[in-house]
Amino acid sequence: MRKQLSRRTVLRGAGVSVALPLLEAMAPVSVQAATGYHRKKEPLRMAFVYAPNGIHMTDWTPQEEGSEYKLPPTLEPLRELQSDFSILSGLAQYHANANGDGGGDHARAMATFLTGAQARKTNGVDIKAGVSVDQIAAAAAGRRTRFASLEIGAEGGKTSGSCDSGYSCAYSSTISWKSENQPVPKEKDPRLIFERLFEGTRAGESKQMRANRLKFSRSILDFALDDAKRLQQVVGQADKRKLDEYLTSVRELEQRVQRSSQGESSGAKKMTKPDGIPESYRDHLRLLADLLVMAFQVDATRISTLVFANEGSNRSYDFIGVPEGHHSLSHHRNDPEKQEKIKKINRFHTEQLAYLLKRLKSIQEGDKSILDRTMLVYGGCIGDGNRHDHNRLPILLAGGGDGRLNPGRHVQYPGKTPLMNLYASMLDRFGVQDNMHGDATGMLENI
């Protein structure tokens, strides 16, 4: 019988620590003996992925309801995953509307998406929104992991200044709020996220040691090699294979992060960069996705948000033939040429979602994948970007929720059904009792 390992076992060496994925040896010894491998309760995760500036809803919304619906063009990149997600139509975010506050739909959209609260219109320090659903879940589950939550995104943000019709920049660049006055900033640098996950777990490695290791391209695994060898001697063959695969994936991810730090991302000109952000937007999003997946895999956190771009972002997508700014195009005024370009941007975002979901689905934990044990919401708080519509939102719910969700369908809800009802239902499945917040009126049925 193999030795039982703690779920918190890490590889240590020279001031770094490398968290491990779930191994068979982490199951109770009695369970290992009786069943080979079976855990009674694996971690349930929750993630929220945000895309800004609205969407071309005609190419997003299926015409049929139920499980036999045909994927519309924007969702076609998800064809292989159709049984792993549902499209939820008819959901709305009332407090993203002006409600007497005038312009500022982009700022309100992001600030309200997870909070359900009307953002106070101010560009000063007296910002106010509400506690976001991810932080409510993090308060419940965060004590079980090293990080209560992980906030990442492809664009940074400011916590002051005016960014949208008199609203603080904090609103249009922040999706996660710890309290009604405390936005949680997101990290955009993959190198810093990687170091937080694998090197920032304990003190020990000085700035000079880190600089020397990076200079000589030494992997964090080089420092933990002896510990890894010792672990290989006390686990079974299945765990040895899983460890090999995992450590290889860590090294490959680390190498990709290092290449991006040196300005060597694929499809981009080499250049010296002061951080680990790839020149290629696609590479950047996929690095962030891989870091989110690895954080879930090693149970560093069970709650995460990933923001593709800030609300009102005017990023160019010239690499897919759309040189104009995204925000500018979203005000298409029904111009067919501009709508076609918006469709291309929407489809590109869906392709990145497909990459993330496939990565989550590829990693097994016992008899299920990480995606099977996750509840992931993808979408935004603007429907038609031209009209700044908050009453018909593009919302996709992916994952199995460890048996608590029934994916694979298009569900049409009555118009203006509160989006917060979905979050109340997710929190209920997450074990949070006080789950009614924002403008939630009840549980969302049929998810």
Image (cartoon, helix red, strand yellow):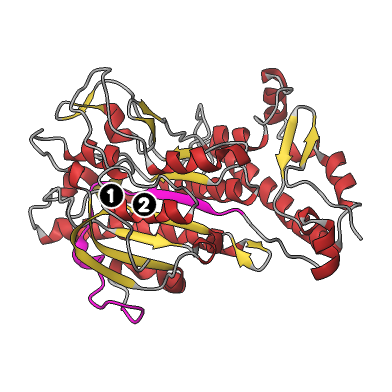
Q: Amino acid at mark 1?
A: Ala
Residue drawn 23% across and 56% down? 393
130 falls in the magenta region: no
Q: Residues within 10 Å of mark 2 (few under 14, many from 20)?
A: many
Location of residue 11 (image quadrant): top right
Q: Position of residue 344 (x, y in %)?
A: 28, 59
Q: Nearer the viewer, residue 369 or 439?
A: 439
Q: Name the side, left or right, on which 406 lies relative to 249.
A: left
Q: Position of residue 367 (x, y in %)?
A: 66, 68
| Residue 416 circle label | none
Residue drawn 35% across and 70% down? 76
Q: Secondary structure at mark 2?
A: helix
| Label 2 sits on residue | 424
The residue range painted magenta reads 43-69
Magenta: main secondary structure equals: loop
Q: Name the side, left or right, on which 126 lies relative to 400.
A: left
Q: Amino acid at mark 2?
A: Ala
Q: Position of residue 422 (x, y in %)?
A: 34, 56
| Label 1 sits on residue | 440
58 falls in the magenta region: yes
Are dots 2 and 1 in contact, CB under 8 Å? yes
Relative to 329, is 207 above or below?
A: above
Q: Secondary structure at mark 1?
A: loop
Q: Name the side, left or right, on which 281 lies relative to 236.
A: left
Kindly give the residue lying farthest to the bottom in the view shown.
68
The N terminus lies in quadrant: bottom right
Ranked by sequence position, the earlier of labels 2 and 1 is: 2
Residue drawn 31% across and 72% down? 410
